[in-house]
Image (tube, grey):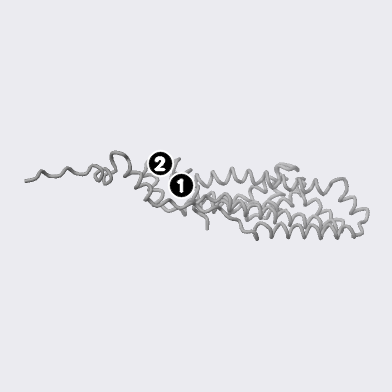
Amino acid sequence: MSAPEAPDLKETEEETGEGTGEGTGESALAAPASPRTPARRVSWQKLTFVPTFLVAILLATWLWFQQADLDPVSENALANGQVSKALWEQIQLTAISTFFVLIIAIPLGILLTRRAFRKATPVAMAFANMGQATPAIGLLALLVIWLGIGRRAALIGMIAYAVLPVLSNTIAGLKANDPTLLEAARGIGMSPTGVLTGVELPLAVPLILAGVRTALVLNVGTATLAVFGGGGGLGVLITAGITNQRMPVLVLGSILTVALALLVDWLASLAEVLLRPRGLET
């Protein structure tokens, strides 16, 4: 009767993955590679259409002004860097007001989706709706009476007018998150802050960015009303053109306002694509 054969150590090591480590290496090589996240792509139409359109509009406006017969009143309204000053004031008003909208609306939206503060959501939304439902010029007039003439009144009015889209989109984005994903994050030991910053906010980014884009365009438009409160901006050219019945001044102020709004909207649309978390690209 022959003795039983000893098991082949090489075969055993390959099956168990122990010993030389060859089994582990082969398993790793055999495992399918994780798919690479596709790079964010911005279509060439999105990149080129709006800038090309803006260049064409501004070029046509410049050519028209070259052959326009400007009287001394129009020349005085456009002289001494008044156009560049008004444009820069418009950009400043838009940027500052949008900054304060973001630092107010996004944290408030996060707070109102927490369990302890959910009952306050209807009250906060009512105030936000009130700010946007109030005619902008009327709100500005009330603020000027209260705060006096100056940029501060204009900025507060613009902030109140633009809070709603960012606040409502922040709340909607956080509420739209899949509860099973949040439970899974808590199940692996993530803290409430970790769940918020690592799961909830990244998933809500697309809606939040859409609200920011809306607020930016709103602020460009309402910034033209800042002139009635002494805040400056392109409204200076528009009101000068209307008051003095000078069409070239009115047209220039209006076209620059529209061009700035389109440029801001285009930049915000690119930001929506570039800042969207990987894995959420559509």
Q: Element under label 2?
A: loop
Q: Element under label 1?
A: helix
Q: CA distance from mark 1 to mark 2?
A: 10 Å
How many marks are shown on the rendered structure?
2
- At horizontal 57% and vertical 46% (from top left) the residue drawn is 105
Q: Residues within 10 Å of mark 1 (few under 14, many from 20)?
A: some
Q: Nearer the viewer, residue 198 or 81?
A: 198
- Asked if residue 172 shows in the view, the reply is no
Question: Quarter-wise, where is residue 99 in the image?
Answer: top right
Q: Which mark is residue 199?
A: 1
Tell me the amino acid under the disc marked 2.
Answer: Met
The relative height of residue 67 versus residue 145 in the rendered view (above or below) is: below
Tell me the amino acid under the disc marked 1.
Answer: Val
Tag 1–tag 2 contact (CB < 8 Å): yes
* Residue 22 placement, left or right of 38: left
* Residue 93 placement, left or right of 120: right
Q: Residues within 10 Å of mark 2 (few under 14, many from 20)?
A: some
Upstream in sequence: badge 1 or badge 2 = 2
Q: Nearer the viewer, residue 272 or 142?
A: 272
Name of the residue lying farthest toward the front: 2
* Residue 116 placement, left or right of 24: right
Name of the residue lying farthest toward the right: 72
Residue 77: percent from left, percent from top = 87, 51
* Residue 40 placement, left or right of 181: right
Residue occupied by mark 2: 190
